[in-house]
Image (tube, helix red, strand yellow):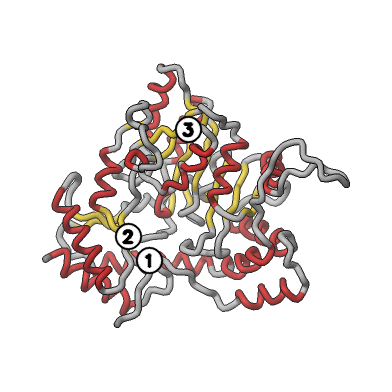
């Protein structure tokens, strides 16, 4: 039996043990420690953030970062938050868990991210209906930046807090800045399938240092200053541990190499699938406008709305699975999630046809930075045979 090829497995640098050993030998097994501070500073340097007051808070997940961002944005029960319809449910889940309401906005084919024209249409309609949106949550899906020029303008015009979910787009850029640094808040993820990992972990980026300090307090159970265990408000146990931060520091040193490896994986697929009829890739941004981190290589089969495209996608996915190769369908639209019932009936879906189409015809291919040329040959040989069959 051939070895299983995974979608995007962790990739060790070889330095992890040294960083962890140092943390162990200095007895920094507690949640806080020097590696935690250093990891935040090093991520900030990679993201081009200026030195000075705190802007980053390392947390135990990207979902925790989104939750804190929404709290700091003042989102409360009954508020409406615009979210992309075509995204992993983790982006919308904290909105619902706060008792707020998701308005799912369709994607656009040009970026596969939230369509800014439809976002504006939703904002106008919600305002007319007497339930104006409180916040705008933009996801940079599959590592490809969203159209932040438009979303920044919409946030200013409608008085919205702008939250970037950059969980999939570490080191991607847009308008000369790293994703996650343009809005009021940005959420990063260091889950095991991302470019770098802390096993599980995330980070919140704040435009204002006072928000970062408030986030730090919330993430550490919000204990009041002083000798007593007094709490004026409730907090959470969201802080990343020092040991996992040490792991992240070892991983972070390899980020430039990981970006280059992800780009090579994409180019390898482009070359191998160039002659296959009806296969297209997630569009690349104009380099003058932004860059993708190419987290996952994603393809579509056939033209928009094609039933044949869905059939070919499923034939390829199942053929790969039979040969122990992990490939995954793209995100199930929010308006189709059983955990989010009644969005359409409540007038909280704007569009939806593009998200449905991407879900029906799209496939994420194995995109790990350990993927070999022989692995790609194996994947593509199976893919081409199944797609043509």
Marks 1,2: beta carbons within 8 A: yes
| Cα gap from disc 3 to disc 1, whole angstroms | 31 Å
| Quarter assignment of residue 388 | bottom left
Residue 294 in percent (x, y) is at 40, 59
Q: Residues within 10 Å of mark 3 (few under 14, many from 20)?
A: many
Q: Reading the chain from its start, which is encountered first: label 1 or label 2?
A: 1
Residue with the mark numbered 1:
7
Image point 49% across, 49% down: which residue? 166
Judge left or right: residue 356 versus residue 263: left
In-front residue for pair 90/278: 90
Name the residue at the right extreme.
227
Residue with the mark numbered 2:
328
Dot 3 falls on a residue whose secondary structure is strand
Residue 113 in percent (x, y) is at 37, 44
Q: Looking at the rendering, in which quadrant would you find the C terminus?
A: bottom left
- The disc placed on residue 81 is 3
Name the residue at the bottom extreme.
1
Judge left or right: residue 311 versus residue 345: left
């Amino acid at each position: 039996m051939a070895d299983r090829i995974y979608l995007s497995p962790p990739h060790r640098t070889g330095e992890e043990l040294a960083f962890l050993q140092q943390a162990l030998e200095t007895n920094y097994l507690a949640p806080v420690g020097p590696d935690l501070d250093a990891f935040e500073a090093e991520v900030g340097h990679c993201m081009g953030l200026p030195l000075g007051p705190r802007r980053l808070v390392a947390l135990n997940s990207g979902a925790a970062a989104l939750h804190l961002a929404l709290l700091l944005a003042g989102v409360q029960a009954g508020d409406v938050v615009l979210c992309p319809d075509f995204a992993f449910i983790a982006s919308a889940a904290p909105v619902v868990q706060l008792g707020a309401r998701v308005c799912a906005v369709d994607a656009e084919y040009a970026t596969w991210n939230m369509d800014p024209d439809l976002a504006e249409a939703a904002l106008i309609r919600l305002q007319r209906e007497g339930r104006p949106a409180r916040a705008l949550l933009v996801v940079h899906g599959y590592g490809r930046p969203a159209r932040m020029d438009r979303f920044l303008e919409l946030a200013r015009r409608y008085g919205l807090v702008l939250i970037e979910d950059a969980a999939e787009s570490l080191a991607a850029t847009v308008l000369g800045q790293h994703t996650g640094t343009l809005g009021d808040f940005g959420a990063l993820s260091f889950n095991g399938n991302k470019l770098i990992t802390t096993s599980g972990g995330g980070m919140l980026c704040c435009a204002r240092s006072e928000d970062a300090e408030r986030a730090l307090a919330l993430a550490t159970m919000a204990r009041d200053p002083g000798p007593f265990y007094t709490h004026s408000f409730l907090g959470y146990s969201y802080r990343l541990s020092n040991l996992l931060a040490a792991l992240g520091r070892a991983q972070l040193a390899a980020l430039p190499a990981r970006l280059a490896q992800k780009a090579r994986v994409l180019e390898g697929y482009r070359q191998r699938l160039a002659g296959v009829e009806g296969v297209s890739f997630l569009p690349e941004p104009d380099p003058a406008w932004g860059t993708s981190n190419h987290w996952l290589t994603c393809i579509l089969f056939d033209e928009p709305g094609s039933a044949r495209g869905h059939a070919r996608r499923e034939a390829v996915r199942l053929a790969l699975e039979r040969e122990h190769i992990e490939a995954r369908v793209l995100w199930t639209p929010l308006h189709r999630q059983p955990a989010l019932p009644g969005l359409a009936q409540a007038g909280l879906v704007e569009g939806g046809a593009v998200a449905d189409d991407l879900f029906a015809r799209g496939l994420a291919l194995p995109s790990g930075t350990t993927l070999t040329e022989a692995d790609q040959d194996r994947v593509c040989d199976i893919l081409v045979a199944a797609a043509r069959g």
